[in-house]
Amino acid sequence: MKIRLHPLTGLLISALLLSLLWPVQASSQTSRWDSLSTSLGFTTIDPGLSSNPVRAIPDANDPDNVIELEDTVQDRGSSTRPSLTLTWRLPIFDGNWSVETVLGPPFRFSFEFTGGNDLSNEIDGKLGETDMLPPVLMLVYNFPLSTAVRPYLGAGGSYLYSFNSELTAEETAEGDLDIENVATWLIQAGANIDLDWLGWSENLFLNLDVKYIDSVRPMATISDLESQGTTIDRTEVRLKLEPWAFSAGLGWRF
């Protein structure tokens, strides 16, 4: 398994750790539990998948024989899953900064060959699927506004972990698919909207959030791919992911 770290990932992680370990005297009169909030809802991820042209290596005994095909790879749409956001307000800087993470089940994405006349003519429709688990850790700045709508901005890191990757097209049923795991960074913008004006609890709020995940280029490798009645030993393609994540949920301040 290969891991590629974005140059900003280490800096972001260091900033998060420094925020947690900052030697200050807590000025807040609330308890640690009073600094927690959570939001339960749904997250939709648009992977923004494209790729370089597919490269085929027909014979493992002749790795220098590389055939560049006309086909590329693209996604077949977004994926939506339930999500749970956990936020801890840091006891520094007047409580305007917080640390946030998002929990949820893996996202399932499907993709296909397109843009060529080699493999895309042989494989009709969906090529394969993969599960992706993108855990995130964010440092968030909450604007100090005493209004019902409270916007925030954040930045952090993520690790795009792919597993259960499989070829689903009938023509490639015997092939094996492997997608490289990569680390990246992301930014977010969102708002918490108080719902106490509805006559409900003052602790209840609506959360709306959008995240942009920095472009990453993992390698996907297909082994034993069949094309035009011939088995290709290995097929490689450099993917390009430019994901956006959109979330909405109901939150509670403890």
Image (spheres, grey):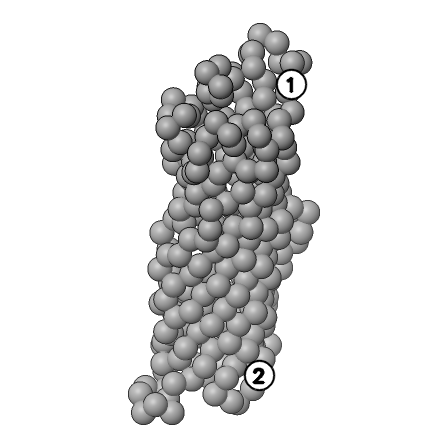
Q: List x then y, in percent, for residue 208.
A: 47, 72
Q: Amino acid at mark 1?
A: Val
> With 219 as the anchor, is 38 left or right in this view?
left
- Could you say which quadrant of the image residue 38 lies in? bottom left
Disc 2 crowd, CA 10 A, few/some/many (<14, 14-19, 20+): few
Q: List x then y, in percent, for residue 137.
A: 51, 57
Q: Is residue 184 visible?
A: no
- In the displayed structure, would residue 110 be above or below residue 158? above
> With 172 as the anchor, is 151 left or right in this view?
right
Which of marks 1 and 2 precedes in the sequence?
1
Disc 1 crowd, CA 10 A, few/some/many (<14, 14-19, 20+): some
Q: CA distance from mark 2 to mark 1?
A: 58 Å
Q: Secondary structure at mark 1?
A: loop
Q: Amino acid at mark 2?
A: Pro
Q: Nearer the viewer, mark 2 or mark 1?
A: 1
Q: Secondary structure at mark 2?
A: loop
- In the displayed structure, would residue 15 be above or below residue 175? below
In front: 189, or 110?
A: 110
Name which residue lies at 48% across and 14% down.
230
Name which residue lies at 48% across and 27% down.
122
Residue pointed to by mark 1:
66
**In the rendered view of the protein, which quadrant contains the C terminus?**
bottom left
Residue pointed to by mark 2:
144
In front: 162, or 87?
A: 162
Q: Are marks 2 and 1 in contact (CB under 8 Å)?
A: no
Q: Is residue 69 visible?
A: yes
